Image (spheres, helix red, strand yellow):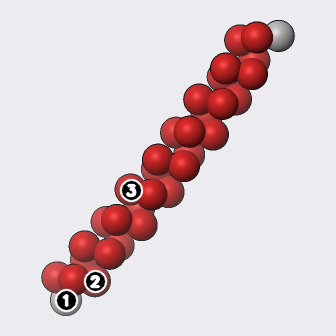
């Protein structure tokens, strides 16, 4: 049970990191225009 919980947290962290990276890229792209 705990292992599954850890995996869920890890995947959520990965999704958040990817989203943050995409937002950063978007903001940087807008900034350069």
Q: Residues within 10 Å of mark 1 (few under 14, many from 20)?
A: few
Expressed as whole percent of the image width and height from the top left, the position of residue 8 reads 35, 73
Position of the C terminus by quadrant: top right
The residue located at (66%, 30%) in the rendering is 25
Callout 1: SS: loop
Callout 2: SS: helix
The residue located at (17%, 82%) in the rendering is 2
Dot 1 and dot 2 residues touching (CB under 8 Å): yes
Q: Quadrant of residue 1?
A: bottom left
Label 3 vs label 2: CA separation? 14 Å
- Residue annotated with mark 2: 4
- Residue annotated with mark 1: 1
Horizontal relation, residue 33 to residue 6: left or right: right
Q: Which tag, 3 or 2, sits closer to the chain's start? A: 2
Q: Residues within 10 Å of mark 3 (few under 14, many from 20)?
A: few
Q: Residues within 10 Å of mark 2 (few under 14, many from 20)?
A: few
Q: Quadrant of residue 29?
A: top right
In the rendered view, tell whether residue 12 sits above or below residue 20: below
In the rendered view, tell whether residue 25 sits above or below residue 31: below
Residue 24 badge? none
- Residue annotated with mark 3: 13
Callout 3: SS: helix
């Amino acid at each position: 049970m705990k292992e599954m919980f850890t995996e869920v947290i890890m995947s959520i962290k990965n999704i958040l990191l990817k989203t943050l990276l995409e937002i950063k890229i978007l903001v940087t792209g807008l900034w350069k225009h």
